[in-house]
Image (cartoon, coloured by chain):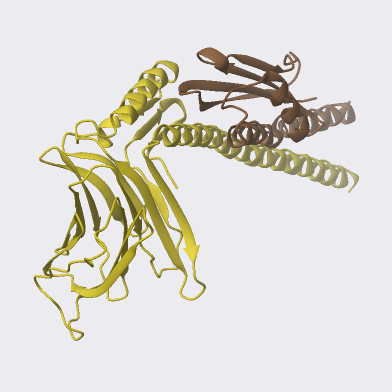
Chain colours: A brown, B yellow
Amino acid sequence: MDVAIALVIVFTSLLVASTFVTKANKDPLPNLQLLKYGSDISRVLDYKGYLDTPDTSQINNEIQRILPNYYDIELKGDGPGSCNFYVGNIPPENKAIISGKYYFNSENEICTLKYKIWLK
Amino acid sequence: MVKMKGSFFTLSGFLLVSLILVLSILYSQTLNQSNDRLMEAGSLERISSLERSLGRTIKEMDNGIDISLERIGEIPILTQINITETINSSFEEYGSDFYDSILDLKSYLESDQQEIILNPDILYSPNEKIPILFKPHNIKYSHYNSNDKINVKITTDVVSQNYELYLHLLNEKINHDRNIEWIIQNPVNESTINKISLTIIASDYDGYTTNISKNISNTEHNQFRVSGCEIDFNTLTPSSIDIDYDKPYIISLLTIPIALFEEVTANYPAGLVLMNFTEINIFKNRTVRIA
């Protein structure tokens, strides 16, 4: 009987300990990396002039060239005229998705680029 | 004896399990704090991305002035600041397109992202327009009203014997028979302690170039004239150069090499962009870097 009680106490303690460790182990570092990738990709597109007069196929080609294989992205341009565009894939519902916003000029109009990026 | 052994064994087991539990809690708390720091870093990265994109958007709107910074020379390391702009309108009209674009951006931005406020009055006041600060030397290049004409004013709070100013003016047409007219009111000799080396180079579209180098006092008033460009060099603290253009369509090119091993940046004044993300306790009073 004593042994049984002792074992229950020991295993309960170990279970609590493992719960703490498991909870804490949800490492956000990859998410930070995702955010940086999204931010960098927006800047690359702007600096290379792809956002001056946005062209869906050109942006798509550049995204495929610069985005690492194990990432996926959705880009939405918002604003007047040619600023409205959609490139990439629809984000999944069962994965961590990181989003961000980037302002840019296109043909003297102010526009925003919203990106969502996730691990495939 | 057996009972003691059992108690000792139970106590040891209990202490061991307690140790594991305490260590796991400490580990959990440390990782939680680390996660908080990473979340902060993520928020800062996101805000920094917004800030950079706004800076680039504002920079692209200002198409009236072109600034380039280039390093020249090996020892000493010199940074050359080149400013090129066309001043061909009255003070009232000067920069009005840029100001209108900034107002458009302000209304767009403040409806889209309430946490960010633009303050265009810093760039466009009734007396001074589009001031640009060169850091870390605090050289200020701005335009002010002089009887509805645009005067360029260059001021600095850094004055030393090693400080050299080069003023390169590209004028419409220089009278080739006349060199730079140097009307120095307070000439200084070599023994003067508070003096600055100033070189003026004037060129015109025909390729004609003339130049002059003088030591000027940084405590006295100095004045000289370049074929139509009135240059008033007033070195009272803070020292300043006022360029009074009396002809339209003049492009000025200012070149200031600075013998300091530091990175030079060109910025609009602080307070142009205010960011107030109260939920994550971030308040930023920022400016826009132009070059």
Query: Residue at (37%, 33%) from the top-left corner?
Result: B273
- Residue B178 location (% of width, % of height): 21, 66
Q: Nearer the viewer, residue A91 or B222?
A: B222
Quarter of the image for residue B60 reads top left
Q: Is residue B277 left or right of residue A45?
A: left
Q: State the residue at coordinates (47%, 29%).
A: B280
Q: Residue B30, located in which quarter of the rendered image?
A: top right
Report the quarter where the N terminus of chain A lies. Answer: top right
- A92 w.r.t. A8: above or below: above
What is the x, y in percent for residue B19?
Answer: 73, 44
Give above or below for B152 relative to B44: below
Work out which quarter of the rendered image holds the C terminus of chain A and state it.
Answer: top right
Residue B95, position as x, y percentages in the image: 29, 33
- Please state which of residues B275 and B170 is positioned toward the viewer in this rendering: B170
What residue is drawn where x is 80% and y is 46%?
Answer: B12
Q: Foreground residue, B175 or B285?
A: B175
Residue B165 appearing in the image: no
- State the residue in front, B104 or B209: B209
Q: Is residue B104 left or right of residue A29?
A: left
Whether residue B203 appears in this view of the structure is yes
- Count of picture labels: 0
